[in-house]
């Protein structure tokens, strides 16, 4: 599998995946290089949306495709923003507007009820109609801070607090986030799945990627 299409137009995701996959013996390209149009994410779960995007990119590019669907799940909000994390404050909202809405929704909620997790589901298809896609899932547990902190990352990172580290995801060095994140965990699962499915590995082997889960 010499070239793999990354089914995303999100600059933050493209940068993060490129860094996480840089050691793999696979040429990963963003779907923009094939002018792949956006596709409606009509699934009712992260898994369904990841598959929709992967199959769509593969169909347009004629190559294997990797897609992720990820978001922030807040327990107090019954799983919101969830599938709608990128457009929580509206279809045209930016990250800052989404964060403001989340803070307002949790106003006066104590730390003990602010638990949350980032979720990432990866879907890898060999072709658009692949009946046996590889599906991997990573979760990163934390809680929602009362105010934004940190300069790194994107999306909700400045509100996603890691109590055991006493910092937010946006206060972590990028290399540290790459070891801990939900995407790093999902990619580690993907590496293990590829290792046990040799037909996916030709012509080059995939080196082991191990996030620090301590």
Image: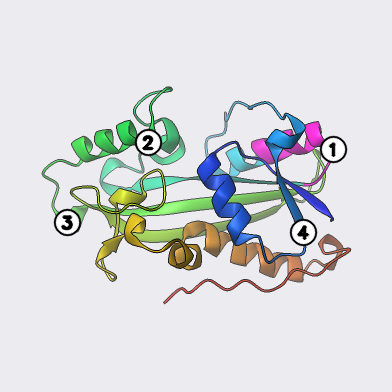
Q: Give the structural element (helix, strand or loop) at label 3.
A: helix
Residue displayed at 37% across by 61% down: 141
- Residue on which the image places disc 2: 95
Determine crowd level at label 2: few under 14, some 14-19, many 20+ residues with C-alpha closer than 10 A: some
Mark 1 or mark 4, earlier in chain: 4
Q: Looking at the rendering, which quadrant does residue 42 occupy? A: top right
Q: Nearer the viewer, residue 43 or 60?
A: 60
Q: Is residue 69 visible?
A: no
x then y, percent, for residue 120: 52, 52
Mark 3 or mark 2, earlier in chain: 2
- Residue on which the image places disc 4: 26
x then y, percent, for residue 16: 54, 53
Q: Is residue 58 magenta?
A: yes
x then y, percent, for residue 77: 28, 41
Mark 1 or mark 2, earlier in chain: 1
The residues bearing labels 2 and 4 have C-alpha atoms spaced at a distance of 31 Å
Disc 1 to disc 2: CB gap under 8 Å: no
Q: Quadrant of the N terminus?
A: bottom right
Please tell me the numbered disc located at residue 111: 3
Q: Is residue 203 magenta?
A: no
The residues bearing labels 1 and 2 have C-alpha atoms spaced at a distance of 32 Å
């Amino acid at each position: 599998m010499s070239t793999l299409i990354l089914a995303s137009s999100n600059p933050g995701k493209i940068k993060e995946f490129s860094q996480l996959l840089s050691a793999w013996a696979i040429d990963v390209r963003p779907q923009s290089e094939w002018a792949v149009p956006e596709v409606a994410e009509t699934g009712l779960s992260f898994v369904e949306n990841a598959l929709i995007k992967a199959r769509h990119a593969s169909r347009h590019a004629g190559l294997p495709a990797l897609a992720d669907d990820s978001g922030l799940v807040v327990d107090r909000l019954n799983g919101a923003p969830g599938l709608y994390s990128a457009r929580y404050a509206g279809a045209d909202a930016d990250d800052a507007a989404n964060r403001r809405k989340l803070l307002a929704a949790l106003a006066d909620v104590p730390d003990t009820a602010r638990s949350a997790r980032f979720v990432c589901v990866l879907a890898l298809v060999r072709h658009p109609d692949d009946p046996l896609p590889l599906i991997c899932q990573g979760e990163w547990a934390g809680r929602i801070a009362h105010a934004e902190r940190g300069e790194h990352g994107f999306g909700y990172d400045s509100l996603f607090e890691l109590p055991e580290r006493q910092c937010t995801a946006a206060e972590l060095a990028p290399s540290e986030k790459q070891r801990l994140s939900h995407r790093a965990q999902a990619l580690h699962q993907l590496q293990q799945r590829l290792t046990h499915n040799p037909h996916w590995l030709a012509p080059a082997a995939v080196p082991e990627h191990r996030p620090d889960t301590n």
